[in-house]
Image (cartoon, rainbow, N blue to C red):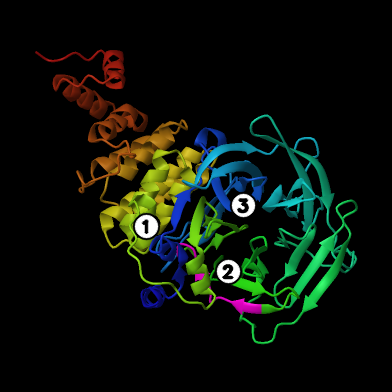
């Protein structure tokens, strides 16, 4: 198995550890909260902890849909390759957190509930709202959410917070106390202190301790009563330098007499038009009891996405449990065998075994993540469940990686459909329909969608204009996703319905007469035929 995994590692270049896990007896499942609760928003950046024998997850819901054009960036949005599609009446980055219970036998959530923060919430005064990238900590028999908050100062100064959360009933969670944590020097940004503190990694078995920085390793302890912080360890680690800053990700746990965590590194840049883009990398880091780094993995990805992130790691019965977010729009829980973990930090795999696992849209994507069709099928699965942010992200990936023009067209079409499903994003939706038309102006489907879009917004002239162009499209009858709701009849109807707004009275009369003569009986046509007193010719 060691040779097989080495070959797989070489083939993937950037390690797809979900694929390694599946081929070594691991498992992966999506973490989905019903869309009637989330509105189809993205779920991402999970954390996990065991409290009194129960596994709890914290999952972050973000109110934006992240659009990220990967690979050759053939299909960037009108605003660039990486865009936060916010509701256009609320241009903020708003976070809501859910605490869920996990059945680790089948990796399914048995309950979920939005954490009620109303007791302590105040009016935000900056545009990043809520407690971001929460890690759960269970210290001194108290459950805490700890993450960064940036909405309490007018310049977005970020500081870690420690929020006490309590459960009532079967699954209701409420924040009862909130403590803002200072830096060790106690200085605010205005006083010369740091601007944004985030991604401190709580140490599960050391109450109120965090790994604040990975290399050099800085370990701090905070006072939960007043939020003051002191440095308890500061070690340089010769031989473990990397080309990028080593930033926190998961919490820190014990494994084989080591402290272990997953950290992240980030490449940020701007393209020729000064549009931001990013690639995230991850590593496993291991420390001894004196907080010296003793082992470190190569960089890896979870599912080969350029933007992936984890806030947690747990250990149970020979498997690591790792929740992670993919492109800020989808959340997963990975069961990673300890044998793979050991392999990643430089160990050896046991004897080779043959492992079978269930094939589905997710595992098919993991095994062939650069195939546009596997991305498209996964997007379709998410869309069917009303998970529009997740679907939009995988449709975008399908468009980037597919070489099939029909798949590409459907993927771009469905990106607009996802924006429609999310709502409150009219400008983005309109431009995405136009982008679909731009990709293949000889196909009629997007013309009908855009004609409807204008008619629903009381713009009949534009509704007629796009329907009339669609009527002339030559590439009709090509396969389309079942989610498109396209039909030639509906396109003709749009053309008939709005032709008089462009002064085409004779043309509208003729089209209505021809339709009635042919026996067309759908309600809107009958309504307009009756209104124009058109009867079937005998």
Q: State the quadrant of the N terminus.
A: bottom left
- Count of numbered circles on the image: 3
Residue 380 quadrant? top left
Magenta range: 294-304
Looking at marks 2 and 3 on the same chain, the residue that comes earlier in the sequence is marked by: 3
Q: Residues within 10 Å of mark 2 (few under 14, many from 20)?
A: few
Q: What secondary structure is found at the residue carrying circle 3?
A: strand
Q: Could you tell me which residue is drawn at 65 percent across and 43 percent down?
A: 96
At which x and y percent is residue 282? 56, 69
Depth order, front residue of 465/286: 286
Per the model, the C-alpha gap separating discs 2 and 3 is: 37 Å
Depth order, front residue of 20/264: 20
Q: Residues within 10 Å of mark 3 (few under 14, many from 20)?
A: many
Extreme residue toward the left, this view: 538
Asked if residue 343 can be seen in this view, the reply is yes
Q: Which mark is residue 274?
A: 2
Q: Which residue is mark 3?
A: 48
At which x and y percent is residue 97? 65, 44
Q: Could you tell me which residue is drawn at 78 percent across and 62 percent down?
A: 209
Q: Is residue 348 above or below residue 158?
A: below
Asked if residue 393 can be seen in this view, the reply is no
At which x and y percent is residue 183? 84, 64
Q: What secondary structure is found at the residue carrying circle 1?
A: helix
């Amino acid at each position: 198995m060691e040779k097989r995994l080495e070959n797989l590692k070489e083939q993937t270049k950037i390690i797809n550890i979900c694929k390694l896990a599946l081929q070594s007896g691991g498992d992966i499942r999506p973490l989905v909260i019903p869309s009637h609760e989330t509105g189809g928003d993205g779920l991402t950046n999970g954390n996990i902890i065991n409290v009194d024998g129960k596994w709890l997850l914290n999952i972050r819901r973000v109110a934006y849909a992240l659009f990220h054009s990967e690979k050759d960036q053939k299909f960037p949005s009108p605003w660039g390759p990486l865009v936060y599609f916010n509701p256009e009446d609320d241009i903020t980055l708003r976070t809501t957190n859910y605490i869920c219970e996990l059945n680790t036998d089948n990796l399914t959530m048995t309950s979920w509930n939005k954490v009620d923060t109303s007791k302590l919430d105040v009016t935000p005064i900056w545009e990043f709202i809520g407690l971001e990238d929460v890690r759960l900590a269970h210290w001194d028999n108290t459950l805490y959410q700890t993450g960064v908050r940036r909405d309490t100062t007018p310049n977005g100064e970020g500081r870690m917070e420690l929020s006490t959360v309590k459960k009532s009933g079967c699954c209701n969670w409420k924040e009862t106390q909130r403590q803002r944590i200072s830096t060790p020097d106690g200085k605010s940004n205005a006083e010369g202190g740091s601007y944004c503190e985030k991604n401190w990694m709580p140490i599960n078995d050391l109450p109120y301790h965090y790994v604040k920085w990975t290399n050099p390793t800085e370990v701090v302890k905070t006072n939960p009563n007043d939020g003051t912080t002191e440095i308890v360890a500061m070690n340089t680690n010769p031989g473990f330098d990397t080309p990028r800053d080593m930033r926190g990700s998961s919490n820190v746990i014990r494994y084989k007499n080591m402290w272990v965590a997953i950290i992240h590194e980030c490449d940020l840049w701007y393209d020729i038009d000064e549009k931001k883009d990013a690639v995230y990398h991850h590593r496993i880091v291991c420390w001894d009891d004196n907080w010296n780094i003793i082992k470190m993995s190569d960089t890896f990805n979870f599912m080969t996405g350029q933007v992936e992130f984890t806030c947690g790691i747990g250990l149970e019965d020979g498997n690591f449990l790792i929740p992670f977010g993919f492109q800020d729009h989808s959340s997963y829980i990975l069961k990673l065998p300890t044998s793979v973990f050991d392999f990643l930090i430089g160990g050896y795999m046991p004897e080779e075994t043959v492992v079978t696992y269930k094939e589905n849209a997710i595992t098919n994507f993991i095994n062939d993540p650069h195939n546009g069709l596997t991305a498209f099928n996964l997007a379709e699965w998410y869309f069917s469940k009303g998970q529009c942010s997740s679907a939009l992200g995988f449709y975008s990936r399908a468009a980037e990686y597919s070489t099939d023009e029909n798949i590409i067209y459907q993927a771009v079409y469905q990106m607009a459909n996802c924006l429609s499903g999310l709502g409150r994003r009219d400008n983005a939706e309109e431009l995405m329909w136009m982008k679909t038309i731009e990709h293949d102006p000889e196909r009629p489907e997007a013309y009908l969608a855009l004609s409807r879009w204008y008619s629903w917004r009381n713009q009949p002239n534009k509704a007629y204009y796009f329907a009339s162009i669609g009527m002339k499209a030559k590439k009709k009858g090509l396969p389309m996703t079942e989610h498109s709701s396209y039909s030639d009849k509906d396109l003709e109807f749009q053309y008939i319905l709005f032709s008089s707004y462009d002064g085409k009275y004779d043309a509208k009369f003729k089209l209505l007469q021809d339709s009635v003569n042919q026996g067309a009986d759908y309600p809107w046509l009958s309504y307009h035929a009756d209104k124009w007193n058109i009867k079937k010719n005998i």
